Image (cartoon, coloured by chain):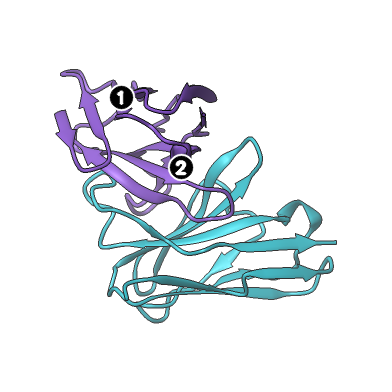
Amino acid sequence: LAKTTQPISMDSYEGQEVNITCSHNNIATNDYITWYQQFPSQGPRFIIQGYKTKVTNEVASLFIPADRKSSTLSLPRVSLSDTAVYYCLVGDKPDAGGTSYGKLTFGQGTILTVHP
Amino acid sequence: EAQVTQNPRYLITVTGKKLTVTCSQNMNHEYMSWYRQDPGLGLRQIYYSMNVEVTDKGDVPEGYKVSRKEKRNFPLILESPSPNQTSLYFCASSLSPYPGGRYEQYFGPGTRLTVT
């Protein structure tokens, strides 16, 4: 069963760069690593996804080392509006007796608080 | 507009009274999934569906049923709700879960259920 481990919480200040690391020691060869952002009382929203090395989009960067057993979400110059819960997600395999490979397991997420 | 809709958004009910939470997506996605979110436990997958008439258990399926008779709809059924099913529920869809969570999941706005 694939699992992810993230810090429970992090604090930062406006304008700083924030790096959130996720550990996924049992990641499978075909699995992608996806990060989601969630604001209170809203559904999670896709931020970024990668398979290996580095991926960058308009809101974040994702660093994945060669062994793929961890990944780091980097948020440049955070603002108060980046205060949210951030989830790392990798693919999963069904438990014994399962019939398909659609099981996805979220970690507990990292509560990021950005201070003025 | 591409979206996932859930109804109702809020529901207060009593123990044992059957209820259905509807979920619908307009993106022709094959994959749909239900999650529950509880404080300190993150998002936990209840059931998922790879396509019409194909469903499978997630991490916390006890007490829930689902059906996928049409591609766009994936209702969550609680036949005899209990207070421990009080939670925030999210429906999500994606093009496909293959490979390893490759495609972005789109989440609905959530349904807050209280069972007394």
Provide the residue designation for mark 1: A72
Figure quadrant of residue B17 = bottom right
Q: Is residue B50 left or right of residue A114?
A: left
Q: Is residue A91 left or right of residue A30?
A: right
Q: For the view shown, which residue lies furthest in the front direction?
A: A116
Q: Amino acid at mark 2?
A: Ser
How far from the left and from the top, in percent, is residue A44? 45, 51
- Residue at 22%, 25% (x, y): give it: A63
Secondary structure under tag 1 reads strand
Q: Which mark, by number, is residue B42? A: none
Among the two numbered marks 1 and 2 on one chain, the one whose residue lies closer to the N terminus: 1
> Which chain shows up in cyan?
B
In the rendered picture, chain A carries what hue? Answer: purple
- Residue at 21%, 24% (x, y): give it: A64
How far from the left and from the top, in percent, is residue A106? 45, 40
Provide the residue designation for mark 2: A81
Q: For the view shown, which residue lies furthest in the bottom direction?
A: B70
Figure quadrant of residue A94 = top left
Above or below for B40 versus B46: above
